[in-house]
Amino acid sequence: MPYKLNESKRHHIPKQRYKLSNWSEYNHALKNRGRIDLWLSDDIETWWTHSDRVYDGTGSSQHYTDQAILTCHELRVIFKIPLRQLEGLIDSLFETMGLPLKCPHYSLLSKRLAGLNIPSPRYKKGVQRDERTVAIAFDSTGLKRYGRDEWHQEKHKVSSKRSWRKLHLGVGDDHVIYSTVLTDKNTMDDTATEALCDQIEEEVSMVSADRAYDENHVYKTVEAHFPEADIIIPPKDYLHYNENHHPKRCAHMIEIAAKGQQTWQQHHQYGKRSGSETAMQRYKRTFGNQLHAREMSNQEIEVMIACGVLNRFTSLGMPQSYKSV
């Protein structure tokens, strides 16, 4: 990023301040995020349970629909409460609304989470874009599984075994999360590129990422999925020109050597990659930096649901900021 070029004098540079040009609309959108009717529609009685249950001799068929299970977990992600409390919350809502419905048992919610068919984050269509194409940025961050928090370790001078999952995101310049992959903490960022690209169905004009993705197979994967996309990945510091490298990778090395790193970034709009960092910050500020589920299969669906909820929040309204003098 360009700000790294000022590393030696950053302590003399004051923090840039911003103001919002749509404060009223954004404030209204923030309040709408807590509305229950955003997730529970008026026709909920028609899709909450299966009307016709078929018994084929292999056991009882499902009573609650996948949409009901998904809605429950969306509410859990939003309010960050355990499944038992979620069951009580939804039951009380149905009683208040006068509906003859019940929330699925908390154990059923846990068991059926991994079985939900969510190939990519939901609610991507609800966000209106000014352009037909989208610029995608790849990045990753860590989510905590278990272990003592930092305050407990510092207070009592103890260490704790900490385990993390790595969340890989493909974020558009419209702040929509188009792809999500959850891996263990030892998985390299570049190895998740194939899975991230497979989830993107939109027409992509540009793909950007940091140096961790500067590998030949990343260029080949992105080019195979999006032939017309401009691939913007800064070469690694130790890399030298080699004809065996991907042609676009070599072109970046030649251009940086001729014009400089900052000019290359400005020419290719590398600053759009900050959208992925913004998405990771929004995820952790909204849902926390810790996973609720214990099993890997459940955790994968949990982050997929959370990213879909974040897309729904994006469709309600985003801040439009400008630099203040």
Image: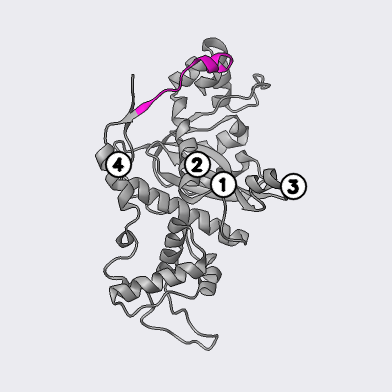
Upstream in sequence: badge 3 or badge 1: 3
Residue 206 % position (x, y): 44, 32
- Residues at circles 2 and 1 in contact by the CB criterion of under 8 Å: yes
**Mark 3, secondary structure of its residue:** loop
Upstream in sequence: badge 4 or badge 2: 4
- Residues at circles 4 and 3 in contact by the CB criterion of under 8 Å: no
Distance between the alpha carbons at the discs numbered 2 and 1: 9 Å
Label ID, residue 157: none
The amino acid on which the numbered mark 2 sits, given as a three-letter code, is Met
Label ID, residue 158: 3
Vertical comparison of 97 with 300: above or below: below
The amino acid on which the numbered mark 4 sits, given as a three-letter code, is Tyr
Upstream in sequence: badge 2 or badge 1: 1
Distance between the alpha carbons at the discs numbered 4 and 1: 27 Å
Vertical comparison of 226 with 124: above or below: above
Pick whichever, 277 or 133, lies toward us.
277
- Closer to the observer: label 4 or label 1? 4
Distance between the alpha carbons at the discs numbered 4 and 2: 20 Å
Label ID, residue 167: 1
- Closer to the observer: label 4 or label 3? 3
The amino acid on which the numbered mark 1 sits, given as a three-letter code, is Leu
Distance between the alpha carbons at the discs numbered 3 and 1: 27 Å
Residue 208 part of the magenta segment:
no
**Mark 1, secondary structure of its residue:** strand
Any part of residue 191 in sight: yes
Residue numbers of the magenta segment: 7-18
Label ID, residue 26: 4
Any part of residue 186 in sight: no
Distance between the alpha carbons at the discs numbered 4 and 3: 43 Å
Q: Which residue is drawn at 33% across and 40% down?
A: 318
